[in-house]
Amino acid sequence: MVKKKAHAKRNVALLYCSFGLGLRAKEMAALKIKHVLGIDGSILDEINLTGNMTKGSKQRHAYLTNPRVIAAIRDFIDDRQEREGILFNIEAPLFKSQKGSSFTPNSLQQLFHRMYQDAKLQGASSHSGRRSFATRLIERGVDIKAVSTLLGHASVSMTSKYIQDNPVRLKQICTELF
């Protein structure tokens, strides 16, 4: 659905940053070209989220190692560079609003809301990707401390609130008990 709308490549890249990196709207709004693109034009393998970009002013890293996340970001950057016809100013916002300026965290939350509404997803928010990111990692056997670190949480108790029960998985766990 999102691939057929205006700014499709940007919006797909935003969704991948949410679901594939677990980034908050505030963090995506603060991203600049320099956070994802090396001087040679290659996608960096990690994003350094500085304290002023994160909730709680705690520095952390997001790792650009998933091929699908990398492809979505590369596709967006290539499209943007082609449309703008210039080399990037590394200090420019990575994600620009329809008006051409950087998003505010609130305007990015509203964009996520509209995308989910268009997809007929009830109750989804800009945090849905973070919750899914955490849940998928736990379901794959990643320890909760590592997930907590990736999300930038101060405690694993906060991370545990993000993890959603998956009825199919719960049924499978009970089936494989003995």
Image (cartoon, helix red, strand yellow):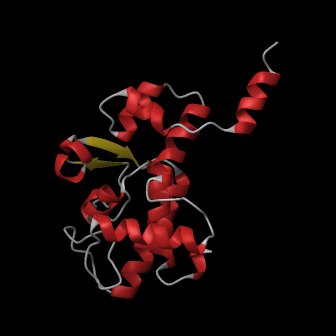
Q: Give the residue furthest to the top.
A: 178
Residue 38 visible (yes or no) = yes
Q: Is residue 1 left or right of residue 134?
A: right
Above or below for 85 versus 71: below
The residue closer to the viewer here, 64 or 117, is: 117
Quadrant of the rendered image containing residue 87: bottom left
Residue at far front of view: 123
Image point (50%, 56%), residue name: 69
Estimate the x, y position of residue 92 in percent, counting from the top left: 22, 72
For the question of whether residue 75 can be seen, the reply is no
Q: Position of residue 113 (x, y in %)?
A: 47, 68
Quadrant housing the C terminus: top right
Q: How many marks?
A: 0
- Residue 174: which quarter of the image? top right
Side (left or right) of 99 relative to 161: left
Q: Please name the residue shown 45% across and 55% down the image.
A: 18
Relative to the observer, which residue lies in front, 32 or 75?
Answer: 32
Quadrant the N terminus occupies? bottom right
Q: Residue at x 42, y 29 (%)?
A: 146
Residue 54 x %, y %:
25, 49
